[in-house]
Image: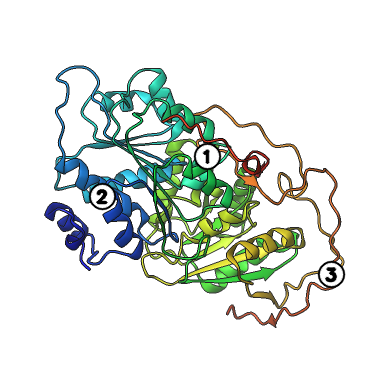
Amino acid sequence: MSFSALGLADEIVRAVTSEGYTQPTPIQLQAIPAVLGGQDVLAAAQTGTGKTAGFTLPILQKLSSQMIKRPSIGRQPVRALILTPTRELAAQVEESVQTYGKYLKITSTTVFGGVNINPQIQRLRSRIDILVATPGRLLDHVQQRTVDLSQVEILVLDEADRMLDMGFIRDIRRILALLPRQRQNLLFSATFSEEIKSLATGLLHQPVIIEVAQRNATPDLVDQKIYLVDRERKRELLSYLIKTHEWYQTLVFTRTKHGADRLVKQLTQDDIPAVAIHGNKSQAARTRALARFKAGEVQVLVATDIAARGIDITDLRPVINFELPNVPEDYVHRIGRTGRAGIQGEAFSLVCVDELDLLRNIERLIKRSLPKEMLDSFEVDPQIRAEPIPNGRSGSKQPQRGRRNEPDYPPAKSSSSPSHQSKKVIPRENIKENIPKTGNHITNPVTHPIPKQVISRRRGS
């Protein structure tokens, strides 16, 4: 089926075709007609399958075909509001709006923290049909009365599972209180826990539920592998893999901001050019680092989970989990940065004894066992015992969240963290069991109550 057969205007089809897309993906086939029909939508699909176009294309169609009379003076009301958890994702979504709407008389802009608010205030004084925003900075504009949300026709929560978790729900409630009760609500994500899905249904009116693949499934085009290694040799193994395979565009994930900065220094010492991107970096630094990585000026981009959602890099193949995430759903989003748009991808995870519980949680979520290997010269030492992971299984105190517009990505929660401080030591006697050893060849206000399960979830780092 073609895009035109879905009821999209010729101008939109022409813009999509100019980007090299001729046939809609499964999520687009189901989502576009539902959105055009005015229905609320709860959609889950694997990363890299075209979810953004699944809601931007019909929104552009609806707004362009139903032009409204605007006031000649005063603030111009926003017609469609798209909320995202990160600045990078906000910028990427707005870029898609601009790309697909380039032949339409639809205006858009984005607002997020980490940059000067004054240029955003200037843009908001003109007509803005589609506003893409992070919650914190949007509330800053609300407080300064520089944005009018009283006539929003369509609300989108992109990466809805993160937008409805305990890091964002308070801000989301405040924003919803400013919107008209009669509106269309669209929730899109790659992962939905049962608790978040239950909470989401309280925001929707008789929604169309779209699941084009098994919920929380990893992309089919991503080859996944676990390399077991001692914690102190992870950096050595990472450098070995990068140099051996001559990977010149590698995305590496760490759990913490400090760990990302430390790894960049270590890789630089190994003559591997690297930069870091995380919530403590200014927006200018984050944008600059991402641009250098995309341009091939640096070999490795080391990132926290701020990059797990919203970074779309053409032909990115290797994604490496230097450390497993505390929240298993974040693993799905991390490796979803590769294997996009029908291109084969690779995802490797370097796992030490401390992370075996995290690995089991991931395998339980994705309902599959991941292949595990040890490389020659990197065999694990069975005498090493597991140590607690800060803000993970150890139940240590969580760092306080900063100002609302400083970082824009609050810590995730770990559903696997016990509440006690002590940690049972995991024996290592059987770690080599069934693991092949290889050589050096690498094969409206929210009134719906928050479920107690969501409230009790602990935050990760």
Q: Residue at x 51, y 41 (%)?
A: 164
User: Relative to residue 398, is residue 54 drawn left or right?
Assistant: left
Q: Which of the 4 image quadrants contains residue 362?
A: bottom right
Q: Nearer the viewer, residue 355 or 55?
A: 55
Reading the chain from its start, which is encountered first: label 2 or label 1? 2
**Residue 233's spot in the image, x, y percent?**
72, 63
User: Relative to residue 414, is residue 382 drawn left or right?
Assistant: right
Element at label 2: loop
User: Relative to residue 4, is residue 448 drawn left or right?
Assistant: right
Reading the chain from its start, which is encountered first: label 2 or label 3? 2
Distance, label 2 to label 3, CA atoms, is 60 Å
- The answer to whether the residue labelled 2 contacts the one labelled 1, judged by CB atoms less than 8 Å apart, is no
Q: Residue at x 35, y 18 (%)?
A: 145
Q: Residue at x 23, y 24 (%)?
A: 76
Q: Amino acid at mark 3?
A: Pro
Q: Nearer the viewer, mark 1 or mark 3?
A: 1
| Residue 409 numbered mark, or none | 1
Mark 2, residue position: 37
Q: Amino acid at mark 1?
A: Tyr
Tell me, yes or no, if residue 320 can be seen here.
yes
Q: Nearer the viewer, mark 2 or mark 3?
A: 2
Mark 3, residue position: 382
Q: Amino acid at mark 2?
A: Gly
